[in-house]
Amino acid sequence: MIARAPGVGAILIAIAAACVPMWWIFGTLQLVVALAVALLVGAALGVLAAVRRWSGLSLLLSGIAAFALLVVPLTAPQRIPRGEWLPALGDSAAALVLSWRRLLSIGLPVGTSDALLVAPVVLVLAGSVAGVWLALRSPRAEVAAAIPAAIGVWAVLWGPHDLPMPWLTGLVAIVPITAYVALVRQARRRSRSPRALSSLARRVGAGAVVAVLAAGAAAAAGAFAQLPDRIVLRGDPPSSIDLVGASPLSSHRSFWEEGERDAEQLAATGLEPGDRIRLAALDAYDGQVLGVGRAAFERVAAAEAGDGRVVGITVGSLETPWLPTVGTPSAIRFVGPRSAELASGLHRDDALDALVAIPGLEEGDGVQLLVQPGPPVVDAAGIPTLDPADPRQGVTELPDAMLTALAAWTGDAQRPGERLAALVAGIRADGYVSHGVLPDEVPSRAGHSLERLEELFEAPMVGDAEQYATAAMLLARQVGFDARVVVGFTPGSIEPDAPTRVLGSDADAWIEVRTETGWVGIDVSPEPRPIPDEEEGAPTVVEQPPAQQAPAPAPAGQDAGNDAAAPNAPQEPVDDGSRLLAALAAAGSVLGLLALVAALPVGLVVSKVVRRRRRRAADEPRDRAEGAWAELADALHDRGADLPPGGTRLEQSGAHEGMRALAERVDRAVFAPRPPTEQEIDEAWRIGDRVLADHDAERGRLRRLAAVLNPSSLARR
C-alpha cells in the first residue's frame, strides 16, 4: 500500500485539475474553499476505508455523514450567523436532486445562492473517496483515472459556451491523469519484479517531452485556429419572462395622481446625497412604446457575497416586477416572507444593467444590496466633453418638428458632445413641465409615441419626464450616441443616517448615453416654472426642416453609410502589414495543427525508443538479457502475433528456430550461476532483431508502419 502512495497524490491532483473549469460556472472564492475541504475530507475517508478495510456500506454511511456535517458551512456559510442551519440543511438536501438542473437554467456565474455549490461538492467528495480507495486497494487501480476524467467532462458540459484557453484547461486535467496511470503501472511492475530497475525517471522525462510537444501544438492551434463551438448542455441564454410591451415609463404619470404623489412608494436606508433609485433601463422603441426586448433577460442567482456599501429597500405602495437598485449591485438578498420566491425568480439584463423579480414586488417585500458606484450623472458643463462609443442602435425616423428643433438648437456645433449638450440645453430651456393630472395644471397628454412627441414640439413645449426623456433619447441617437431611458426615483431629501421616504412625486426619468468610457446619465427634464401662453412661448424655427440625420461621425474616421437609419461603423484600414499578419497567422495555424496531429505518433515512437534503450542499458546483466526477449514479445504483440499466454520461453517459442535460440540464451543468462557476458547479451539482442526482421520481411511497408505506431504494447505492461 505504501508503494501506491504516490498514486494517491496524483489522483488528488488530477481531481483538483479537473475542477478548474468550474470557476467559470460559479465565479466565487467560496468554490475554492468548498472543493479544497471536500477533496481533503474525501481523501481522508478513502485512506481510512482502505487501511481499516471498511465495507462498502460503512464507506457510504461515512460519506453521507461527512456531507451532512460539511454541506452547510461549505455551500451556505452566510446562513449560519443568521441561525438558519436547519433550513439550509434542508435546502442542501433538496439541491442534491435539483441543483443539477438549476445550474443549466441560470446565468453564469451562479455564485453561492440556491445551494448550487452542492453539485460540485458532491462530485469532489464522492470522487476523492472512491479515487483514493481504488488507488490503494483495487487490483486495477487505473480505473480511478476515470473519476477526474468524469469530473472534467461534467465541468465542460455544465459550463459556459466560451471558456478562456480551453486547450490549456484540457492539458491541465490530462497531464495529472496520465501521470497517475504511469505511477500505478510502475508500482505494479515493481511489485511483480523487485529486481527490475525503476523506470519512473525515464518515463517522466519521456512524458515531459510529449507534454511539451502537445502543449506547443495546442497553444499554436488555440491561438491561430478557429476552434469549433463547444458542446455543452447549457443552451442560449434563457429568457423565461416576457417583457414585450411592458414599459414602466407608460405608468410614470400615475405617480403624480392626487392620491399617489404623497404616498410612500419605497423606504430606503443607506442612501447618500446624490443617490438615485433605478428601476428600469429602456432602449427598444417601436414608435409607440419604449420598452425592452425579451431575449436579453436571463435568470440569475441572488448572490449574498459582494463588496460595497449596504443599502436596504422596503417596498411600500409600489407594485412592479422591476427591482429597485442603487448604483451597481454586487450582492442581493431578499428579505420578508416572499424572499425565497423572489430569489428564485430574479432575472438580469447585463447590457441594460436592470433586474426583474418574478412574480413582482408587493408591499412589505424587502431587499438588501451591496452596491458599487453606478453610471455617473454628468452635469451641463461636462456634456460637451463626451465622446460617443461606436454606435450600435441606429436612428429612428423622426417627425419634422423634432428635426427642426434639433437643427435650431445645435446650430454650428460640430463635435457629437457639443451637439448633445446643445440639444439637452434646448430641451431644458424651451420645455415646460406639466403632468396634466390635477385640475389646476396645464393640459398635457400622457404617452410617448411619435405622434405625442410631435405634439410636444409645438409652442410652447409642455410635457413631463415621460416625453422629454424619450425625445432626448431619440435626438441623442441622431447626433451619434447610443442612448436609453432610465426610469426610477430621485429622492428630494436624503439624510445619510436616517431612512429615506421615497414618494410618488420623486418619480423621475433621465437618459444614459454610451461614451468611450461607458454609460453616463444626463438629466433632460426642464425645471418646473410657470408656463406662458402659447403666443409668448413660440420658439424661433427655421423655414425648412432638415433631412433625417444619420449619427454624426465619431472621432477615428467613421463614415456615415448610405442608410440614414443605420449606425456608423468604423472603417477597418487594410494595409500590407495586416495582410502579412493574416498570412502569418494562417501559416501558424496550419503548422500548429500539423504539430498537434504529429504529437501523438511522435510520442509513441519516442516511448518505444526509450523503452528499448532502458532495457538495453539496465544495470543488471540478467535484466539486459531478459530485456531482449521482452522487446521481441512486445514487438510481436504490436504486429498482432502474440505469444501463447503462460508457459516458459521455450514453450512460447514453438518450432521457430530463431525464437528457440533466443529463449535458450535468455534462460541460460537468467538462471545460470554466473551473469552473462556482454558478448552473450549482444548476441541475444541480435537474434531478437533478426527474428523481427524475418517477420517483417513478409509484411508490406504500411503494415510495418502501423506496427511502429501501435500503442498496444505500451498499454499492456
Image (cartoon, rainbow, N blue to C red):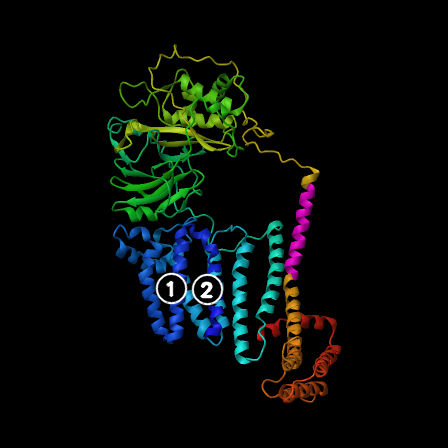
Which residue appears farthest toward the front when viewing the image? 674
Task: Identify the residue shown where x is 38% and y is 68%.
Answer: 45
Does the segment drawn in magenta span residue 596?
yes
Indicate left or right for 659 with 373 as reference. right
Question: Residue 680: image x %, image y %?
Answer: 71, 84
Q: Which amino acid does label 2 sit on?
A: Leu
Indicate left or right for 665 with 252 as reference. right
Label 2: few (<14), some or many (≥20) within 10 Å?
Answer: many
Where's the C terminus, which quadrant? bottom right
Does the segment drawn in magenta span residue 114?
no
Task: Identify the residue shown where x is 65% and y is 54%.
Answer: 592
* Numbered circles on residues, count: 2
Q: In which quarter of the image is residue 712?
A: bottom right
Task: Identify the residue shown where x is 52% and y is 72%.
Answer: 184
Rounded to the nearest angstrom, the CA distance separating label 1 from label 2 is 11 Å
State the residue in front, 374 or 455.
Answer: 374
Which residue appears farthest toward the top when viewing the image? 536
Magenta extent? 579-598
Please name the residue that numbered disc 2 is placed on.
Answer: 12
Question: Residue 252: image x %, image y %?
Answer: 34, 30
Q: Which amino acid does label 1 sit on?
A: Val
Question: Residue 148: image x %, image y %?
Answer: 48, 64
**Is 272 situated above or below 75?**
above
Question: Residue 424: image x %, image y %?
Answer: 44, 22
State the residue in front, 458 or 477.
Answer: 477
Where's the N terminus, which quadrant? bottom left
Label 1: few (<14), some or many (≥20) within 10 Å?
Answer: many
Indicate left or right for 354 with 182 as reference. left
Residue 41 is tagged as: 1
**Is 103 situated above or below 676?**
above
**Is 558 situated above or below 184?**
above
Label 1's element? Answer: helix
